[in-house]
Amino acid sequence: MGLGEFALIDRYFTRPARRAVLGVGDDCALLTSQPGMQLCVSSDMLVEGRHFLSTVAPQRLGHKALAVNLSDLAACGAEPLAFTLALALPGTDDAFLQPFAEGLWALAERHGIDLVGGDTTAGPLNICITVLGQVPAGQALLRSGAAAGDDLWVSGTLGDARAALECFRGTLALDGGAFETLRRAMELPEPRVALGQRLRGVASSAIDVSDGLLGDLGHILRRSGVGARIELDAVPRSALLAALSPDVQRNCLLRGGDDYELLFSAAPGRLDEVRVAARDADVQVSRIGRIEAGDALLVVDGRGQVLHEHARGFDHFAA
Amino acid sequence: MGLGEFALIDRYFTRPARRAVLGVGDDCALLTSQPGMQLCVSSDMLVEGRHFLSTVAPQRLGHKALAVNLSDLAACGAEPLAFTLALALPGTDDAFLQPFAEGLWALAERHGIDLVGGDTTAGPLNICITVLGQVPAGQALLRSGAAAGDDLWVSGTLGDARAALECFRGTLALDGGAFETLRRAMELPEPRVALGQRLRGVASSAIDVSDGLLGDLGHILRRSGVGARIELDAVPRSALLAALSPDVQRNCLLRGGDDYELLFSAAPGRLDEVRVAARDADVQVSRIGRIEAGDALLVVDGRGQVLHEHARGFDHFAA
């Protein structure tokens, strides 16, 4: 992007660092690590048509690009510290960059984190963010800690983002107000950062639901060497989703993706602590099933009938 | 990339972590920070046509994508620790991924660093790497420390990568052997990681030459509030470049880019230490001029005639 690159970084992406020793403007950013803490790192790349639609408002895209990364920190129970932003842009368009930066900064400031570096270049639109967080050594929530008998929990509600996508695809028709609400869920996910931190020492495993409940649960099951049983009726859903057909609900809830809620396991004896963590974080949590021995992932209806059964993972899941 | 994504990460981008507590496979990677150290972070995004040509061999592209990031750590005097890789790919093509991963891992292993996480997605080819390194607190080399009277140094030779680009563009014609040598400089840059670390406490400022000598020197001058005088004849060049016309040489040396050599300043009294650092790192270094008071960036020829003059920066430099 030549000359434009430095002006663009100055204009939109440079603010004084609060936590970082040195932010944007040198070859590297510098961060001081705190004793007894481990550093958590995650990178996500967003591409048009895969992770967002061309119709998304730039402000919401700025929010979402950072939100999906913060959601990875939330899933580890980490406190966010800083992030880098690498951006490929077809052109330097104020009408895009100004609101994009606003959406990004608004979320960054709510979580008190610095943009410490990055890169801009000309190219097909691509947004790559790397987030850095910290967690007390040995206390990160992992995918690998679920044990048979643990309760299975999820935050918020699932499926609205997928329902919005179906509206965009034309396979679902809703009135304008309903569509806008679902669209908001898809475009403005709220990373469960506070909940993740409060679940340290309480949850036995955690992941954020980005690829759909069954897919992401599969990661926990494989890593933990266990199976699970989900009660479909217990999977939390919005009133809007609950008004749609059972097939649409089931598809959106189980295979939705883009939810960015936390899916976690906790021993039954931790139930009260889970409820306190959720209350402190001001997030609803729902018990949706149980971790079981073996490798089967079962979904059952209200009468205990098995709706789906699969050996862990989602690769060949026929939902 | 759906199902393919996990298989792809397993196949090409997962190896046991050596330094990281937890590498690829959870929501975040975990790194343990060492007491007294600061963390250095840098992200670079590579796009076809801007940072590499479609003709580059995938193995070399894998090398270069990591090399340009390690070069940022080198410019800060940091010890590399780990990196994340986010990759947008038009398709999952073994013929590309296998050699790309080989080139990447070969360089990573030479520097003893872990690939700790990342992301793969379908999309126009885009490679985004974030590197993490460490430096003793307060000892990072910055762009801001140059002082009037300091010598100005550069490692290796400059300009070969630009000469190769001119061959690709058809503005320069060389025989096959010469072209291959220049092309190697462009496609397989060697990040000066060892030199950067040895220059801690010796150099007063440093940057890596990625955008061209004048442009990158401009960053040091602006950040340090000084000017500089460069002796064009002292700027190190390969025998191949030295055989080309004076105009081509000058353009490639001053405005080349993609050199990934270190440009640094050091007080004259540090001369012996600079030479020892270079010898220890097994890298040639050349004194190419001096930092001066004021804000002029002068380039002079062997008779002291001013070839170029500009107030810092390169934005309007008429080379």
Image: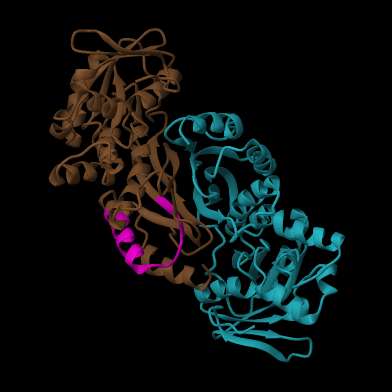
Chain colours: A brown, B cyan
* Residue B189 visible at all: no
* Residue B150 visible at all: yes
Determine the residue positioned at 36% across, 55% down: A114
Q: Residue A109 appears at what percent x and percent y?
A: 28, 54
Determine the residue positioned at 40% across, 19% down: A317
- Asked whether residue A131 is drawn in magenta, I would say no
- Asked whether residue A101 is drawn in magenta, I would say yes
Determine the residue positioned at 59% across, 47% down: B80
Q: Nearer the viewer, residue A315 or A209?
A: A315
Q: How many marks?
A: 0
Seen in the image, is B187 located left or right of residue A135? Answer: right
The region drawn magenta spans: A83-106
Quadrant of the snapshot with the C terminus of chain A:
top left
Q: Residue A67 appears at what percent x and percent y?
A: 32, 45
Seen in the image, is A236 located left or right of residue B142? Answer: left
Q: Residue A287 appears at what percent x and percent y?
A: 22, 20
Q: Kindly indicate the quadrant of the structure image that contains residue B12.
A: top right
Determine whether A112 is above or below B289 in the image.
above
Q: Kindly indicate the quadrant of the structure image that contains residue B254.
A: bottom right
Determine the residue positioned at 85% across, 60% down: B176
Q: Nearer the viewer, residue B183 or B268?
A: B183
Q: Residue A4 appears at what percent x and percent y?
A: 47, 71
Seen in the image, is B309 located left or right of residue A226? Answer: right
